[in-house]
Image (tube, rainbow, N blue to C red):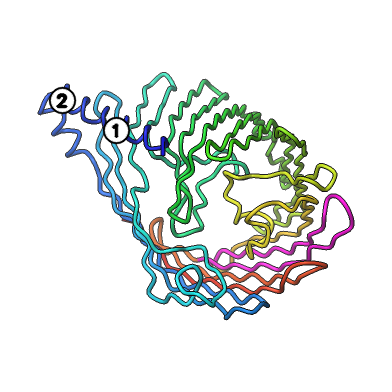
Amino acid sequence: MHGKKILAVTIALLSAQAMTASASTVESALKDGKMLADFRLRYETNDTDNTTDEAKALTLRSRIGYESGALNGFKVLVENEMVHALVNDYSPETAGFDPVPDPTGNEINRAQISYANTTGFAAVLGRQRIVLDNARFVGNVGWRQNEQTFDAVKLDYTMGAIKVQYAFIDQVNGISFNAVDVTDHLLNVAYTLTPGTLSGFAYLLKNDDTDAKDNTLGASFTGKTGMYLYSATFAQQKTDNFSANYMALEGGVDVSGVKVFLGNETLGSDDGQYGFQTSLATKHAFNGWADKFLASTPTAGLVDNYLKVAGNLYGVGLLAMYHTFEADQGSTDFGTELDLQATYAFDATSAVGLKTASYSKGDTGADTDKVWLWAEKRF
């Protein structure tokens, strides 16, 4: 797979940098570095109304790595990621059970050279994490035990209130320890204003294995005025054969730390033949935690109307969401879902959480109940 090229170039540049630097400067950068350690133990169930048994998964995600100190503005980061199953009554680990998309495996999660200077310019070369805006179009799928990373070159430039980000992606390293060769160009420009942030973006994607292409152009605005919170996003996506629009609107109020939102997200359809896709997104955060629309947007499109309430009680973060789903084209009822979450952070590096998702089918689908209980620690 040609996607290994950027990783190979990163290793070659790392070797060249080490050879040209003096022993004392290299030693200093190594001493100023830090070890990276991130562990998450999670119990997850999936009870879908079908012919397979309820899934039960107890998995441990371990990330171990090292980031050097700066050497003339350069840093090196290497990180390995492993997923172990302590209870594996789930597909794909064991046949006959409902799926939990956390297969066991081991891989290099990140291997990158970064550079930053005082003029606002920064760059990262190699296998890296990329998250743009709210991760609706480009994200690391951080909820899954094996996160999504990219073999890429990413350039950032910040000048006052303007931030420009560009990335060329050669390979997508997916959550199933799979790799996809791509030729993706991502451009994101953000302008911070007094009431919020205005962003414009162009994401030009091509799967090198299938030659499938989609180009997405759009803009978003997110802000707050007093107690009122609001956001809006519009985008248009074109493939060789189809065109579909995306729209998201959300409005809310913040009263004494309790936030209440009403929102609509519409992934449009092209005459019922193609639904707007977000192949690089952190999809779990959108359209319900039961992940009923994770694989792809229905060809009829998807309209998600939701109510969201968030707050904090005695240090416990609480979040509740209720969704109604329907087709953008036609009258298909895709069902409803109730999502509940409670999290508690002991400090900046330790947290526990509990959440549930209850999906009720509409004209299609299958009733699904999911539960997650987790603990995580970073060093």
Quick one: SS at disc 2?
helix
Q: Position of residue 13 (x, y in %)?
A: 27, 27
Residue named by callout 1: 75
Q: Which badge, 1 or 2, is on the more N-terminal residue? A: 2
**Mark 1 surroundings: few (<14), some (14-19) or many (≥20) residues within 10 A:** many
Amino acid type shown at disc 1: Lys
Amino acid type shown at disc 2: Met
Q: Quadrant of the N terminus?
A: top left
Quick one: SS at disc 1?
strand
294 up-or-down from 11: above or below: below
Residue 113, by quadrant, is: top left
| Membership of 322 in magenta stretch | yes
Q: Position of residue 258 (x, y in %)?
A: 67, 59
Farthest residue in the right direction? 331
Farthest residue in the left direction? 23
The answer to whether 62 appears left or right of 315 in the picture is: left
Q: Position of residue 336 (x, y in %)?
A: 77, 66
How many numbered marks does the figure carry? 2
The answer to whether 28 appears left or right of 345 in the picture is: left
Q: CA distance from mark 1 to mark 2?
A: 15 Å
Looking at the picture, tell me which residue is in the foreground, 334 or 163: 334
Residue named by callout 2: 19
| Membership of 319 in magenta stretch | yes
Magenta part of the chain: 316-343
Looking at the picture, tell me which residue is in the foreground, 308 or 248: 248
